[in-house]
Image (cartoon, grey):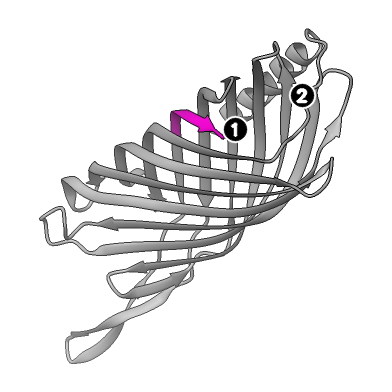
Amino acid sequence: MKSKLKVFSIVFVVVSSFISQSFATSPGLESSNEIGVTLSGYKYQELKDGYNNFMSIKSLNVGMDYIGTLMLDSHWFMRGDAIGVLSGNANYASDGSGTIDNVPNWYIDVRGLFGRGFDFNNFTLAPYIGIGYRYLYNDLLGGGAGGYTRESNYFYLPVGIMHEVNLSEQSKLITMLEFDYLISGTQDSGGIENKQDSGYGARLGCMYQYNNWSVGPYLTYWHISDSNWKIAGLVEKEGKLYQLLFQEPHNYTVEAGLKVSYRF
């Protein structure tokens, strides 16, 4: 998966650079609001004890997002964005407990960003940094098979760069590359809370904008390491009490989709 992300990133940079050399108008950044709708394929997978597919959740997601950009002067900017994604048809599969269909599954992702735009002869580059929060909920009880609810809370540091180039007076191409460093993560599985504080994410996006409308693909990736061990209870065996330990295994999430948005 890492090699695929590297190849995608290289292609992304090369295409953006080629396009930026092909047109002669400078776009610049501007204050704006943007509302979008997303449709994506989603896969969450845990790996443990040599299993290739210890547990997975796959779904088709529909989401809505908002992006607000405020220019502080001609170069510096602040940006806030929020996305909510819902799936009513997530499918759960585990090597140990079988399958569950139609698992309630949704997440929200909220970020605040701060950056600066650098205008060149025919394109703009805008590096940025910020803080993000991601909340994920899936309900294996709601799937009707005696499972448990699971909640994920991630605080992370996004660091990225945007690239804008005008294609004509009415259209432009906006591309984005971002790395997300996990600051703190907490998993609550059926009332058992574990810490997952090691991990990272990546985001890639490319939007074609014509007047106020935009459309384009995006890719989001997360890789989270093993959590700490937590005492989940006690069990008696042959007159002795033993501790039951629980750990959230390392996992990755891939979401690839298409976004349509309106800027005003």
> As shown in the figure, which amino acid type bears the numbered disc 1?
Leu
Check disc 2 and report its element: helix, strand or loop: loop
Q: Residues within 10 Å of mark 1 (few under 14, many from 20)?
A: many
The structure residue drawn at horizontal position 69% and vertical position 41%, both measured from the top left corner, is 31
Q: Quadrant of residue 136?
A: bottom left
Q: Are marks 2 and 1 in contact (CB under 8 Å)?
A: no
Q: Nearer the viewer, residue 67 or 179?
A: 67
Looking at the rendering, in which quadrant would you find the C terminus? top right
Instruction: Work out whether mark 2 precedes mark 1 in sequence or the reverse, and give the earlier one.
Output: 2
The magenta stretch spans residue 47: no
Image position of 106 with respect to 119: above or below: below
Seen in the image, is 59 located left or right of residue 183? left
The structure residue drawn at horizontal position 52% and vertical position 46%, both measured from the top left corner, is 222
The structure residue drawn at horizontal position 43% and vertical position 29%, both measured from the top left corner, is 257
Number of the front mark, 2 or 1: 2
Seen in the image, is 144 located left or right of residue 210? left
> Dot 2 corresponds to which residue?
27
Image position of 3 with respect to 56: above or below: above
> Dot 1 corresponds to which residue?
204
Q: Is residue 71 visible?
A: yes
Please identify the residue farthest to the right as the structure is shown: 121
Q: Quadrant of residue 16?
A: top right
Check disc 1 and report its element: helix, strand or loop: strand
> As shown in the figure, which amino acid type bears the numbered disc 2?
Pro
- Measured Cα–Cα span from mark 2 to mark 1: 21 Å
Percent coordinates x, y for residue 108 in the rendering: 43, 53
- The magenta region covers 256-264
